[in-house]
């Protein structure tokens, strides 16, 4: 990591924290579908997905150490390899104040 490096949270990084790893996994799954290849599926499930999962986790440790609280907030708001279906409370704010009366 370079000291002046910025945390990118827009574009594809606003949908998932590791868009390139997700794309690679989807390519392997597409190969399985296109060629109806049990070998491609086995490689994807037994090697590619676990490998990228391990890489992503190690990168997350490095990013958390470098960016601290900013990365912790980002992790809470954006899914690792799959987009979140609903934004988290942190992503949408604390909500309206309680009604009085």
Image (tube, rainbow, N blue to C red):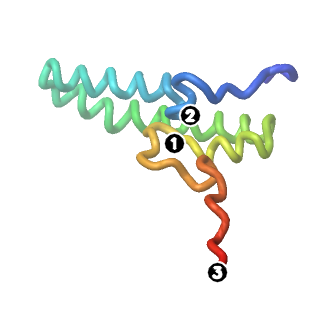
Q: Position of residue 88 (x, y in %)?
A: 55, 52
Q: Dot 2: within a 10 Å radius of its alpha carbon, few (fewer than 14), some, or many (20 or more) residues?
A: many
Assign a secondary structure to mark 1.
Answer: loop
Identify the residue under disc 3. Answer: 101
Q: Nearer the viewer, residue 93 or 59?
A: 93
Assign a secondary structure to mark 3.
Answer: loop
Q: Position of residue 61 (x, y in %)?
A: 70, 41
**On the rendered structure, is 1 left or right of 84?**
right
Which residue is pictured at 45% across the width and 39% down the height?
83
Q: Which mark is residue 30?
A: none
Identify the residue under disc 2. Answer: 17
Q: Nearer the viewer, residue 41 or 29?
A: 29
Q: Dot 1: within a 10 Å radius of its alpha carbon, few (fewer than 14), some, or many (20 or more) residues?
A: some
Vertical relation: 3 (above or below) 77: above
The extreme front residue here reads 101
Question: Which sits earlier in the primary sequence, circle 2 or circle 3?
Answer: 2
Question: Which sits earlier in the primary sequence, circle 2 or circle 1?
Answer: 2
Question: Which sits earlier in the primary sequence, circle 1 or circle 3?
Answer: 1
- Asked whether the residues under the numbered discs 1 and 3 touch, taking CB atoms below 8 Å apart as contact, a structural biologist would say no
């Amino acid at each position: 990591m370079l000291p002046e490096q910025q945390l990118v949270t827009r574009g594809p990084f606003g949908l998932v924290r590791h868009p390139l790893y997700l794309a690679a996994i989807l390519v392997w799954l597409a190969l399985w579908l296109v060629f109806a290849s049990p070998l491609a599926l086995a490689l994807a499930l037994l090697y590619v997905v676990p490998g990228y999962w391990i890489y992503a986790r190690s990168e997350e440790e490095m990013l958390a150490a470098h960016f601290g609280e900013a990365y912790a907030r980002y992790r809470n708001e954006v899914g690792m390899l799959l987009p979140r279906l609903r934004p988290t409370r942190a992503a949408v704010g604390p909500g309206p104040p309680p009604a009085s009366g």
